[in-house]
Amino acid sequence: MPLVAHSPLPTFNRLKQEGQTVLSDRFALQQDIRAMHIGLLNMMPDKALAATERQFFRLIGESNQIAQFYVHPFTLDALPRGAEAQAYIEKYYEPWAAIQDQGLDALIITGANVTQPDLSLEAFWQPLIEVIDWAYDNVTSSLCSCLATHAVMQFRYGQTRRALGHKCWGVFPHYVVDRTHPLVNGVNTRFDVPHSRFNDISRDQFDAAGVKVLVESEEAGVHLAVSEDQFRLVFFQGHPEYDIISLLKEYKREVARFAAGEREDYPSMVAHYFSQRSQAILEEYRLALIDARETGRSSPAFPEELISAALDNTWHDTAEAVINNWIGHVYQLTHVDRKKPFREGLDPNNPLGRLNLD
């Protein structure tokens, strides 16, 4: 079943305009259908806050059809915000204390902007640990995205991410390395996932922590892994939630930084993302921009419309399938009292034990 618009959050109207089915709260309450409550801890910086919110709401709404989804966005007070973003959060997001009081069936944690060489020095570090620890005891499953994966691997497993020395960004082919796990049930054995990061948790580090790797790439490394109990913590190192234009927007932003003198080197081409024709257009633009800088002329307009029209999305259907599997198993494992999913009849060390994995 669809998302339920239980608040005036603008994302609901945006998704309805895209063609998604979004129920009003009043209509949803009239239906005799199981409700699922999913938290979204959105730690993204101001400019990406609403876009990231929409991306995860969209994936949830397009996935499992067995329940009505109430998605509860919240953030951490420790994260610095501008006035506009803070006003948006105060109007549409829920307080962390209310999330704890109401309880959740599942939790998604986004990435965040990093300003320190060590994640433990970030302002969000201790508040994030508190959320994860609470969720570990009170939520059936938590899905950690990119930076959140790196943070949890550091404070819970003692595995500190390592700098790559370059930016890993692009749309990379991945392979399912464990086809028996329910999260990859019905998923193609080879599929694409976008990545965008400067740091990495390696396969050896996941293995050393006892975290089970399910999906990886020869070029981009591990994408999908699960905690030792197979389900309580789900780790994404890539960005399957990305829109088709997300990497283009990132590339354009870095080019603009070069044009403004905020970075010395011209950004590398995003891997496996642009067509050959688009790459030729972007190379022509690079030369024109460099010439304009050297001669003191105004920068040419970035050819965004030409490039965006030629982009292909080769990852969304698989992302939807994985989220569908995740939510489906959360549904099966969650008790009527969603505040106490592990209290009765469920082994906390093996939450998938109740499921038939044959």
Image (tube, helix red, strand yellow):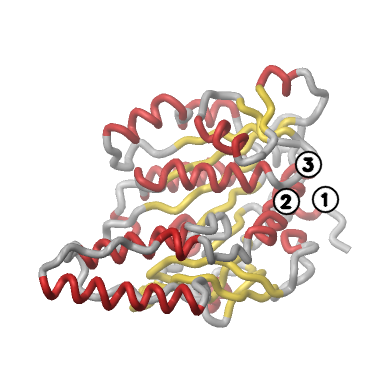
Q: Amino acid at mark 1?
A: Arg
Give the residue furthest to the left.
296
Q: Which mark is residue 354?
A: 1
Q: Which mark is residue 324?
A: 2
Q: Is residue 300 left or right of residue 147?
A: left
Q: Amino acid at mark 2?
A: Asn
Query: Dot 3 corresponds to which residue?
Result: 65
**Image quadrant of residue 267?**
bottom left
Residue in front for this viewpoint, 284 or 219:
284
Q: CA distance from mark 2 to mark 1?
A: 18 Å
Image spot of residue 250 (x, y percent): 39, 61
Image spot of residue 194 (x, y percent): 53, 66
Q: Are marks 2 and 3 in contact (CB under 8 Å)?
A: no
**Image quadrant of residue 117?**
bottom left
Q: Is residue 21 left or right of residue 58?
A: right
Quarter holding the N terminus?
Answer: top right
